[in-house]
Image (cartoon, helix red, strand yellow):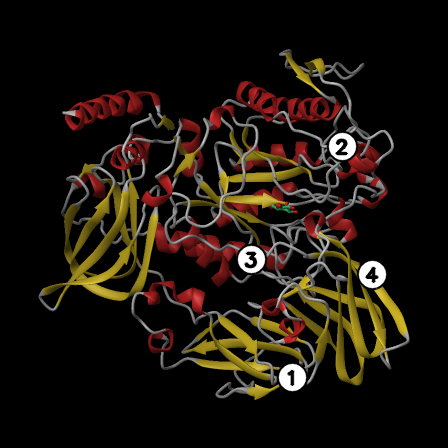
Amino acid sequence: MKRNFTTLLYALISLVGYAQGQSTIKIEPGDSHEDIIEKAALVVPTANQYAYKKLEFTCFVHFGVNTFTRKEWGDGFEDPQVFNLQNLDTDQWCRTAKEAGMKLVMFTAKHHDGFVLWQSRYTKHGVMSSPFKDGKGDVLKELAASCEKYGLKLGVYLSPADLYQIESEKGLYGNLSEYTDRVIPRPVEGRPFKNKSTFKFNVDDYNEYFLNQLFELLTEYGPIHEVWFDGAHPKRKGNQKYNYLAWKKLIQTLAPNAVIFGKEDVRWCGNESGATRESEWDVVPFDQDPHHMNLFPDLHGDIGSREKLTNAKYLHYLPAETDTSIREGWFYRNEDEQKVRSADDVFDIYERSVGGNATFLLNIPPNREGKFSDEDVSVLKEVGKRIRETYDNDLLVGAKGETAILDANENTYVLGEEGKGTYVITLPQAITLNRFLLQEAIQTHGQRIEKHALDAWVNNKWQQVVEGTTIGYKRILRFPDVTTNKLRIRILEARSKPSLSNVSAHYYTARPPQLAISRNLKGEVTIAPKKSDFDWKTHGIDVNESTSKNLVIRYTTDGKIPNEKSPIFSDSFFLKSGEVKAKAFEKEQTGSLAEREFGLVKKDWIAKGTIANEKNSAEKAIDADVKTYWNSGNGAPELTIDLKETKTIRGFIYTPPLNFKEGLIEKGLIKVSKNGTAWKTVQTFDLGNLINDPTARKVRFVKKAKARYVQIISIRGAGGSSSASIAEIDILE
Ligand code: FUL
């Protein structure tokens, strides 16, 4: 009886839900696991979230004092004079973003250093005190105008962490000020607002400052479509709390179409390297009602499978955003050392993120000329071209089957049976495809499909081409070329009745694969196609088998770009130290450049340091395996390495552990010695954003040093950690 009643109730909820956009559903005491899964199938995005999902590909722009100081994280002590911007071409940013197929620009109006890039009334630490247009410039204003000109939406990143407000004498961050009723915006003489709304909140000084600035950003730069709250904090002070519920009230009133990142509208995907989940669920379990929550912890790993929903108190629609940078690091540093992702790489992330039910936010950091650099521009143009050539051309045009999924209309859909559905598509003539795109009717039915497969009619029988898990807003299946005149989609597992709204077939002209360069402990270098490019080959197909027999890999070790005359890589070779560059050549095509710098061979080195346990011993820092790491535990956070011979060294590469967040060396010191007793300090170093972006960091010495012994000492661990950890240390000759 209960079953029938609940079914009826859900049918009702579902009807009401569809009409109202039920993006959060409460779990009632007594709801069984089955009931929870049925409820999960009813959670739909809000209108703002749905519009946001449709943006698909968006542009992050990190710009500020760090662009000029060449640092990853500023410290709040920057003199505004360093922001010596002579030229600014926001039209070029927007033109490029548009050509790449991006739909929104997300701008760092204030990063963690606290320097503001608009004419704020509430601080002097920003463009108003810089040489840029004699203190009259407003980067956000110019960007907003360019966005309008190119038909792009605008988003603002306002960092809650604010080192200027932490470090400066009269800084407001964590100043222990009283919570009192305050009117937002606080009037400033001679600078009236056109927008006359006011708000009253019971907040402290820093929250008031933050709200005043949000008010400026949301009312004076045209419609804002996304507000980005970064969870990263280089430092905290005075137990400063954030009154997010007040911030939200302001945003929802002043920018009613905006989604809020890092809170209850959009979530961080969990990494900054462009990694994507195999199953990206939009319906996430919560212990409390997310609409009343102030703090939103980052979510990692599996977050939405049936198992994860078991103990939910609330089910909430919370889509993922995949953010990564086109360059190493988030801010522009230089042209020669800071590597830029290839078009192959960006296109691959595009297919995995947009085609994996996430929104792709790619960072393009403008240079000190106020422009996107040429290399970044050419990569973006190429990516845009590939997206258009591949996805603007639907090979199913003229095909017969369920009209609702072939009509490219997001409002029509087919509803399957409970947990399954099979759809056959017949083509007027044979096509060759290697991409298949599927979309669920998430607007009305939410995300339901858990497993699906694509079959092709080949040699008079159905053959499974590929199998996938979740779909959601969009899934792009990638597989080797298949030629057929009949396709079949099978929904194999779903929560409730699956509802597909759109499918299309595409052909991507394969390029030579991206390459990965590695070196073992003995110094032997291997160059091979990068595995991640061959995701689809995890379905039983071997990488090397599928790589064309015509593929030739050529490489150099002299810094030159490999060409048709460079040596062919056939077997591993020994490299004492230096840089390897490689390219794949296949028929007339040349692949993208792979490059990697190696330090001295570490085979004979000896490393010493205190340890927390045997698993994380000192030699793990020099074993040429980034998956293992040294951790000092409670002992001194320092590691001493005996290179076994005296060398002239010019820097080092620090690789932090990937999945261990203790002891990441944010500020450190390097000492050298010729005999192991008399030590000389070479220099200190500062590395930012290690917790969220635990990638290898290169530190060049200002002056070369002679050393047989090298000591790395941690002065400050990320997040206040007192130990030191190293996955790998490489010493550059
Ligand atoms: C991180 C920040 O610390 C980085 O600097 C960058 O802004 C990135 C998008 O988020 O957490």
Badge 3 or badge 2: first in the primary sequence: 2
In the picture, measured across the screen, residue 34 lies left or right of residue 561, that is left
The amino acid type of the residue labelled 2 equals Gly
Disc 2 and disc 4: Cα gap in Å?
28 Å
The amino acid type of the residue labelled 1 equals Lys
Disc 3 and disc 1: Cα gap in Å?
25 Å
The nearer-to-camera label among 2 and 4 is 2
Residue at 76% across, 30% down: 174
Image position, residue 551 (x, y; %): 41, 80
Answer few, some or many: residues within 10 Å of disc 1's Cα (few below 14, many 20 plus, some between 14 and 19): some
Secondary-structure class at tag 1: loop
Q: Which residue is mark 4?
A: 684
Answer few, some or many: residues within 10 Å of disc 4's Cα (few below 14, many 20 plus, some between 14 and 19): some
Residue at 21% across, 25% down: 6
**Figure check: 697 above or below 141:** below
For residue 126, say whether it is visible: no
Q: Which residue is mark 1?
A: 603
Answer few, some or many: residues within 10 Å of disc 2's Cα (few below 14, many 20 plus, some between 14 and 19): few
Secondary-structure class at tag 4: strand
Badge 3 or badge 4: first in the primary sequence: 3
Nearer to us in this view, 502 or 259: 259
Q: Which residue is mark 2?
A: 238
On residue 520, the disc is: none
Badge 3 or badge 1: first in the primary sequence: 1
Image position, residue 219 (x, y; %): 62, 22
